[in-house]
Image (cartoon, rainbow, N blue to C red):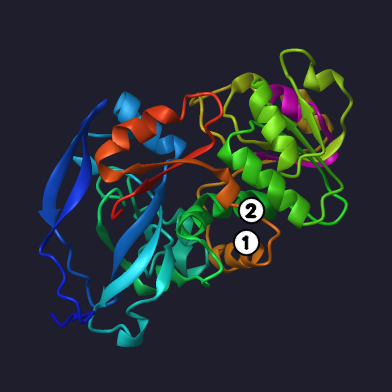
Amino acid sequence: MTVTTTTTVLPKTMQSSVLLGAQHIELQERAVPTPAADEVLVQVTAVGICGSDVHFWHDGYLGDFLVEEPLVLGHESGGRIVAVGADVDPARIGQRVSIEPQHPTATSRETLTGHYNLDPDVRFYAVPGTDGAFAQYVTIQAHFAWPVPDSLSDDAAALLEPLSVAIAAAQKGGFTVGTRVLITGAGPIGIVTAQVAKAYGAAEVIISDVSAPRREQALTFGATRAIDPLASDIAALHLEVDVFVDASGAASAVQSGIRAVRPGGIVVLVGMGATEIALPIPVIQNRELVVTGIFRYANTWPIAIELVSSGKVDLDRLVTGHFPLSQVEAALASTTQPGVLKSVVTPNA
């Protein structure tokens, strides 16, 4: 196998943060991966902590995914290309990139119709069976290593991944000029979705969260109104929004949010919580609501890069802390602390 590298000799081993079981992470020395013919080798500069990482670490599973073998977490990542496979232009060496962390089957029905995120055999970073980016080096197919302009920080390059989740939600919800949007959950995804809504021209962006500090943060990120669901019954406020996006996963938030949607409106379920919840079927039927979910994203990175490059979305301000690779466990635990919005791991710092 032919691999082209930088003029600097790459190390043969690297450090990786490995999940061995619930709340059991170990720093291990592993071989630096060799890129396949259509892949690049990326030296990782930043990795955001996602809620799914926290679930896998804390519980040892997420939904139907169970950690039964050692797993490297982390899928919000970016870095610099330091080597390329035989079929990749060597001119790409040195490029700063954001990683779209999936590898779909090229000939699946879903991939061929443009919905490669729905490929049932897709391999995704940090899901059991595929290691993620809490490591000093990773490989990814060259077309999923998206070049980013120098105006984007390393943090922002990594956080194009959660921004892509928000873009996928916006596409499903049909955000456009004048749209009135309700978002439940003012965590990172809720905050980024609020920014995307404003960037798309939403007339009103209402966000709900039980945390007062997060509600206050949301107002600085584009939300026009923040509601405490413990103090006000959202379903009784007659909001009549065009689109409701749940970014909390809380059953009560989903149920009340659906009741806040105007007839003919759209409900987009993003947050992951209980595997089953009761829905107000008469409301959905009588108002002819469209209820849908999103599963990651597809074809969103060019949009994400433009939104950040143009200043319409601010990802850097989401970051509330940086951690070295040796402190991944502390980074995961930090997400429950008041005031923490997005923690970032820097594997090569």
The amino acid type, in three-letter code, at marker 2 is Asp
Q: Nearer the viewer, residue 173 or 200?
A: 200
How far apart marks 2 and 1 lie (CA) works out to 6 Å
- Residue under circle 1? 308
The amino acid type, in three-letter code, at marker 1 is Val
Residue 270 can be seen in this image: no
Q: Are marks 2 and 1 in contact (CB under 8 Å)?
A: yes
Which element type, helix, strand or loop, lies under badge 2? loop
Q: Please tell me how crowded label 2 is: few (under 14), some (14-19), or many (20+) other residues with Cα within 10 Å.
A: some
* Magenta region, residue range: 255-268
- The structure residue drawn at horizontal position 20% and vertical position 82%, both measured from the top left corner, is 7
Of pointers 2 and 1, the one earlier in the residue sequence: 1
Which element type, helix, strand or loop, lies under badge 1? helix
On the image, the x and y values in percent for residue 158 come to: 45, 56
Q: Nearer the viewer, residue 62 or 198?
A: 198
- Residue under circle 2? 314
Left or right for 139, reference 309: left
- The structure residue drawn at horizontal position 10% and vertical position 64%, both measured from the top left corner, is 12
- The structure residue drawn at horizontal position 14% and vertical position 75%, both measured from the top left corner, is 9
Which picture quadrant has residue 344?
top left
Left or right for 250, reference 58: right
Q: Is residue 107 above or below residue 283?
A: below
- Quarter of the image with the N terminus is bottom left
